[in-house]
Amino acid sequence: MAVALVTGVAGFIGSHLAARLLAEGIGVRGIDDFDPYYDRSLKQRNLAPLRAEPGFQWQEGDLGSVPLAPLLAGVDVVYHLAARPGVRHSWGAPFADYVRINITATQRLLEALRETPVARLVFASSSSVYGEQVGGETPESATCLPISPYGVSKLAAEALVRAYHASYGLPGIALRYFTVYGPRQRPDMALHRFVRALLEDRELVLFGDGTQTRDFTYVDDVVAATLAAARVGRPGMVYNIGGGSPASLNDLLAILERVTGRPPRVRREARPAGDPQATRADTRRAREELAFQPTVSLEEGLRRMTGWMTELLAGAAPELARPSGPTGVDHRPSGPTGADHESD
Ligand SMILES: NC(=O)c1ccc[n+]([C@@H]2O[C@H](COP(=O)([O-])OP(=O)(O)OC[C@H]3O[C@@H](n4cnc5c(N)ncnc54)[C@H](O)[C@@H]3O)[C@@H](O)[C@H]2O)c1
């Protein structure tokens, strides 16, 4: 049986990816250290169905310190999703964590892959590497000038993947995901907070005037692209993965009002540093080389996400009692006013 390693398997995208691999008959070895950026119990909830699957091997551990040779033994493909996400929170002292997790742990993994080669490494990069995007759709050839420390850390990791490909032939591919959403979306992301506030009939905070646009990408489409990259992607390449449903935050709220039947009560605050005005992917390369074709419209995706959130709240999930998110290292604004419009 083919075996894939998924790093960050208890996270939002990693848990969906692992489920899809298992459904396709591929064994999954998953590692996660329950990074305290957001609540551990949400990650345990993501992990629970995976752990019930016979093809799933679970390891709790930090990629920055666990022995990597046994983790990589017998693995065909590595999907490297483990990271410290979050644009707004990457300023100031916490940047040290972004360096440790996003850059140093990635380099450690790349060194280990020199010793234990695999057929493909797929790295989860981000649209945040581009920074402020102007002039419509952004192709992969656009100059990368990130405007947040998070974007800098993802660009550095992506550059490492390419350097190990150029110098050692390591078959790494980077995918620049654009604003991923759907069930299990991270609690710090704007959409998660918007949907939750609407369902709980609370005021929500919108940073800026709401004209910022994002290229929203449904998680199942991201997973399909990630699997395709491992199968047919070209080593050393980078691919934009965007859902083709660019919408402003004001548009988003209008759709959410239709989906939930509740008018949002919006409080506006100043736009935070690091938050670009617009993101929009040129996905020609992914469409041509990976046969990437987003299948879930924004309205349908928001319906699915609202259904998931309704269930989560109905179950009175204890993890949702603390909307502020991260535990232990809470350096972030807390409470329902902390809505984040980050591009990642
Ligand atoms: N969600 C988005 O919109 C988006 C957009 C662009 C890129 N990305 C990238 O996709 C990947 C997944 O993002 P997500 O939204 O699912 O985030 P997530 O935080 O839900 O998942 C990341 C997981 O990695 C784990 N992790 C962190 N440090 C680790 C370490 N040292 N060792 C082992 N595990 C560790 C965390 O505990 C977490 O479960 C990340 O690399 C992120 O940068 C996400």
Image (cartoon, rainbow, N blue to C red):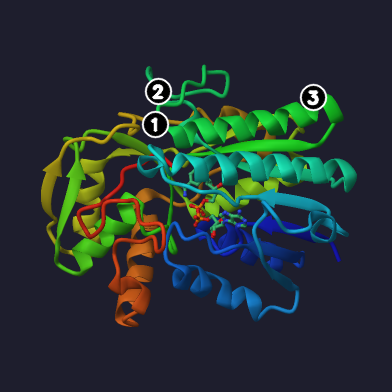
Q: Position of residue 107 (x, y in %)?
A: 70, 39
Q: How many marks on residues?
A: 3
Residue 145 image position (x, y, % from top left): 47, 21
Q: Earlier in the sequence, mark 2 or mark 1?
A: 2
At mark 2, the secondary structure is loop
> Which one is in front, 292 or 205?
205
Q: Quadrant of residue 343?
A: top left
Q: CA distance from mark 1 to mark 3?
A: 29 Å
Answer above or below: position of 163 versus 183: above
Determine contact: label 2, label 1, CB under 8 Å: yes
N-terminal-most mark, 1 or 3: 3
Residue shown at the point (77%, 33%) measured from the top left: 235
Disc 2 from disc 1: Cα separation: 6 Å
What residue does disc 2 label? 133
The circle drawn on residue 166 is 3
Q: In the rendered structure, which amino acid carries the disc numbered 3?
A: Ala
